[in-house]
Amino acid sequence: MNRKIRAIVVDDEILARKALRAMIKDDPEMEIVAECRNGREAVAAIRDESPDLVFLDIQMPEMDGFQ
């Protein structure tokens, strides 16, 4: 059995996170391991989960995707 791609979704807008979840949910090769609302949550989730892939919003308040 192949290992799934472990992904984290990061966006301050709930509708954007919901849309990404909807696109990913039926892909048998992907698994969302965390969903984050801001950069601080994303940093913690990336450290905790060591994902293969991060869907990252670049423009967020406080800490943007580049930081």
Image: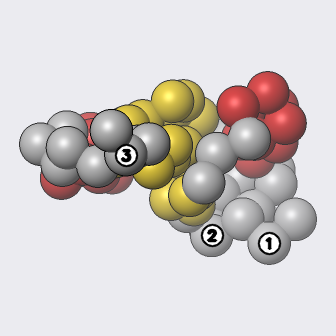
- In the image, taking residue 63 as reference, residue 25 lies left or right, namely left
Residue designated by label 3:
2
Instruction: Decide which of tag 2 and tag 1 comes sooner along the chain.
Output: 2
Instruction: Decide which of tag 3 and tag 1 comes sooner along the chain.
Output: 3
- Which residue appears farthest toward the left when viewing the image? 26
Residue 3 to residue 44: above or below: below
x and y percentages locating residue 2 in the rendered image: 37, 46
Residue designated by label 2:
58
Residue shown at 71% from the left, 53% from the top: 61
Q: Nearer the viewer, residue 12 or 49?
A: 49
Distance from disc 2 to disc 3, alpha carbons, whole Å, reads 31 Å
Q: Secondary structure at mark 3?
A: loop
x and y percentages locating residue 15 in the rendered image: 28, 43
Q: Local crowd at mark 1 within 10 Å, few (<14), some, or many (≥20)?
A: few
Q: Secondary structure at mark 2?
A: loop
Distance from disc 3 to disc 1, alpha carbons, whole Å, reads 31 Å
Which callout, 2 or 3, points to the residue nearer the camera?
A: 3
Residue 28 to residue 35: above or below: below
Residue designated by label 1:
66
- In the image, taking residue 27 as reference, residue 36 lies left or right, namely right
Is mark 2 in CB contact (under 8 Å) with mark 1?
Answer: yes
Residue 53 to residue 35: above or below: below
Picture quadrant where residue 56 is located: bottom right
x and y percentages locating residue 11 in the rendered image: 51, 49
- In the image, taking residue 28 as reference, residue 10 lies left or right, namely right
Residue 36 to residue 15: above or below: above
Distance from disc 2 to disc 1, alpha carbons, whole Å, reads 6 Å
Instruction: Decide which of tag 2 and tag 3 comes sooner along the chain.
Output: 3
Amino acid type for the residue under numbered disc 3:
Asn
Residue shown at 45% from the left, 49% from the top: 5
